[in-house]
Image (spheres, helix red, strand yellow):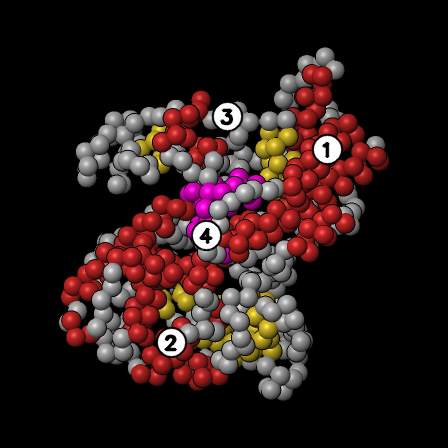
Amino acid sequence: HTIDGAEEGTVCTTCKTSSTSLSASSLALTRPLASPAATLLVTGMVREATFCAVVIVTASAFSPSVPCTSNNGCNIHTRNRLLASSSKLSTTPATASYEHKLQLPLRSVPLNLHASDIDISDVCSLLDIEARAVPRQNDAGIRGMYPDLTDDGSVIKEGESVLSVPLSSCLRDDMPPWWLSSAFPDDDDDIDDSDEDNDDYYASQWATRLAASLLNLKLLSNNASAVVRNIDNTSKKYEQGMRLWLSMLPNANTLRASLPIHWSPDILQSTRCQALELAVDSAYFGRANAVADLIDGLNKMCADLDPSTGIELKKDDMSALCNDSLDIVQTRTCRVIADESMAPMRILAPVFDFLNHGTNPNAGFALESDLLVVRATRDILPTEEILIDYGESSTVPAWRCLTSYGFLPDFDEGDERNAVEILVDGVRANVGGDSVPFELVEAAAIRLAREDGITLEEGEGENIFTSAVALRIADRATEEAQQLLCESRDLELATGDTYSLNLAAALRLSHHKVLTSWSAGLREYANSQ
């Protein structure tokens, strides 16, 4: 139950249970999550999984070596960084062998969730979509959008339109079905929608509204006679087009297996990525609340509909349907701004949702009047895949993209955006690229000074980034990189867990490459001193 207030002794208005203040050790016992550390770092106010309570964690409960973090798992405090030039080492034979064993392609696009090529011409005709692109699969079996060679086979010039989708053919979060309108009031979301830095995978009311529209569409597709339309006067042409688009969406079981929010604690821990565990723990209750709101709405709909519609949903069916719809919303939603004076709008746009993410995109999108338009940001060759940027807040670093969309982006080696968290001498920091966090340099310098019998406090000393400090940090990075390859667990696998485990292994391999490259740069710096 939701308890307003964060002071000890606050009473839940539903079950009359008082909140309690728990120590770090008791918190880990009463709310078992992916790890005790993850439990401590989620928020200062956590609802219990086993009983109703607000957990208040004081500053003393945090380990000194674990910095307090915000909801998205990124460090709150930042320090100036010392830069060190580096040259990148090639992948070691051990890494190449390990990568060869993986069953999933490490690409910058979502994994192939739909086996066959798709003909979108009927969807485009029914929904008034104009497209100069068609879905195709590459040699790795990954589906993407490519220039339509039947058009004229020429280059798509910079600024030219690639795809345009009418808003009237999209599902919109500001137009929920009638049965959800009473599920919760139309107040503002807990998360400020105007903040572009909010993480897309945190379920909020806009996600619930959009998932309700998708659920409504699925029910309409399965029960054509039922009066469960998303908007009034929905045309038969629109219904046919949307029904056809629904048939092209990813398989629900495969999509579920790709998203860490559905993974077991053992699989989450196998990633050796605390930031990912934090993100999943933090998103858990938002997802649970969204499912509960959707089920409340579906119950209202089933109660109000005439029995002749043929709609009858069991509780277990409702939960699965709601989670499947939220998965689609999480992985395929587009954020657009219709009016600068209004909050951003989230939409599910047919065909547009087939566009993959690229770390070096060649197209961008925007709302132009009542059309969602995709335009080339540079010339696109006929053989090139059309790629857009899903946004750094949900794709950087790699673990965040996996959490948000269920795939790993293909960052260039040494790309500083793909940072990996590492612990050095009691200090955690994100590392990658050519930069070295100052806090790691300072911590290593203090430890080395103490080993030499010298007292060095924080903020003291000049030119502390010595070769010895660089090598100490590099050794720690190399140690962690090797541990990422040696991760091995005996797990009781359920259906779909092999797919999830392979993704977890792919994330470890990605982090291994970052740390190996980064430590090589540190060693080169140390040798140059």
Other residues around mark 3 within 10 Å, as few (<14) / some (14–19) / many (≥20): few
In reply to whether residue 488 is colored magenta, the answer given is: no
Q: Which residue is mark 4?
A: 494
Image point 35% across, 36% down: which residue?
A: 46
Q: Nearer the viewer, residue 360 or 298?
A: 298
Other residues around mark 1 within 10 Å, as few (<14) / some (14–19) / many (≥20): some
Q: Which residue is mark 1?
A: 475
Q: Earlier in the sequence, mark 1 or mark 3?
A: 3
Q: Which residue is mark 2?
A: 242
User: Mark 3 belongs to which amino acid?
Assistant: Ser
Q: Nearer the viewer, mark 1 or mark 4?
A: 4
Quadrant of the rendered structure where residue 228 is?
bottom left
What span is in magenta? 257-282
Other residues around mark 2 within 10 Å, as few (<14) / some (14–19) / many (≥20): many
Other residues around mark 4 within 10 Å, as few (<14) / some (14–19) / many (≥20): few
Secondary structure that dominates the magenta span = helix
User: Mark 2 belongs to which amino acid?
Assistant: Met
Q: Position of residue 66 (x, y in %)?
A: 53, 30
Quadrant assignment for the N terminus: top left
Q: Disc 2, disc 1: CB below 8 Å?
A: no
